[in-house]
Amino acid sequence: MLFVRDLTKRYARLTALAGVSFSIRRGEVLGLIGPNGSGKTTLFECLGGVLPVDQGAIEGVGGRLSAEERLAHIFYLPDSIAPWPSQRVQWLLEYVAGLFGGPAERIPDLTSELGLEPLLDAPLGSLSKGQRKRALLAMGLLTPQPVLLSDEPFDGLDLRQTREVATSLRAAAARGRAVVLSIHQISDAARVCDRFVLLSDGRVVGEGTYDELTMVAAARIGGHPADLEQVFLALT
C-alpha cells in the first residue's frame, strides 16, 4: 500500500531518523517496535505530516505522495492528546465520522467493542487516561483513510481493555485497513501484530514477520531466540 523510502529527520546536529525505509501493507497490523528515544514518535509525526522531513519520501503504488495525497492516505492518532475536553464522547464520535466522511454506522459497534457505552455522555476532559485512550481510538477507527497510525494504543489500559482494543484493531485490519502501531511494550506487540519494524537509534534494524525476524536473529546469535524481546535484543 505505502512505501517509506530513506526517511531522514535532523534537529541541528541530532539525527532523529536516519534513512528509515519499510513497507505498509493493506489489511495488516504493523508494529513499530523500539525503546523510548528510538524515534518512533518522530517517525509517526513525519508520516502524519506534523513534521517536515529532511530527506526521503512516502510513496504509493503510483509513486511519491504529495502532501494532499498523504492526508488522504494516512490518519495519525498521537498519544496523550485531549481534544475538545468539554464535549461528550458521543459528540466526538459523530463529529469525526461526519467531518471525515467515515463509517458512522460503525459507532454502536465500536462503543460496544471498546466498552464506551457508559461514557458516551461524559465530557472528554473528565475521562481517565485509559478511558480517553479508548475514546480516541474509536475516533481513529471511524476515519476513512486506508492507513491508521496509532501511537502507544495500549498505554494506560488494563489487561482486559488491552485485549478489547487489540480485537478492534484486528477487526479493522480484517476489513482491509492498514493499522500501524507504535509500541514500546514488546509483549503487547507480539500479541496483536502481523509484522514488525524494529527501530533503534533512529534506524530500522529489522522488518518482517516474527518467524522471519527470528531466523535472522538466530543466525546472528547462534541459537533460537525465546521470544520477540530476545529477537529485538539480538538485532540491536
Image (cartoon, helix red, strand yellow):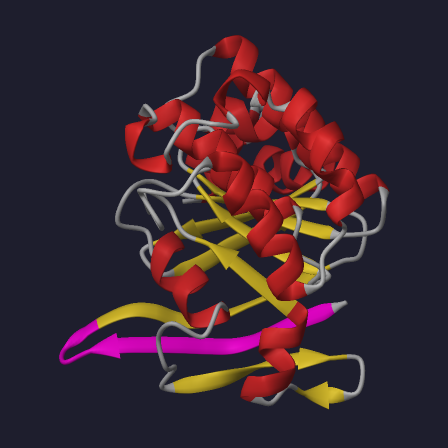
Asked if one can make out residue 206 in the rendered structure from this viewpoint, the answer is: yes
Q: Quadrant of the N terminus?
A: bottom right
Using residue 207 as the reference point, say whether residue 54 is left or right of it: left
Which residue is pictured at 66% across the width and 35% down the height? Answer: 193
Magenta stretch prevailing secondary structure: strand
**Residue 185 at what x, y percent from top left?**
42, 28
Task: From the viewer's side, name the closer residue of 213 and 191.
Answer: 191
**Residue 204 at what x, y percent from top left?**
48, 58
Which residue is pictured at 68% across the width and 22% down the height? Answer: 113
Residue 3 lies in the magenta-colored region: yes
Q: Residue furthest right?
A: 175
16 up-or-down from 218: above or below: below
Residue 200 lies in the magenta-colored region: no
Which residue is pictured at 63% across the width and 19% down the height? Answer: 164
Task: From the viewer's side, name the closer residue of 35 and 139.
Answer: 139
Question: How many numbered marks have been drawn onto this rendered protein structure?
Answer: 0
25 up-or-down from 115: above or below: below
**Residue 71 at what x, y percent from top left?**
58, 75
**Residue 93 at what x, y percent from top left?**
58, 44
Using residue 128 as the reference point, say whether residue 74 is left or right of it: right
Q: Residue furthest left?
A: 13
85 up-or-down from 228: above or below: below
Using residue 14 as the reference point, say whether residue 28 is left or right of it: right
- Using the rendered view, name the quadrant where residue 124 is placed: top left
In the image, the segment drawn in magenta is 2-14
Task: From the viewer's side, name the closer residue of 208 and 226.
Answer: 208
Which residue is pictured at 73% across the width and 61% down the height? Answer: 146
Asked if one can make out residue 191 in the rendered structure from this viewpoint, the answer is: no
- Using the rendered view, name the quadrant where residue 147 is placed: bottom right
Q: Quadrant of the C terminus?
A: top left
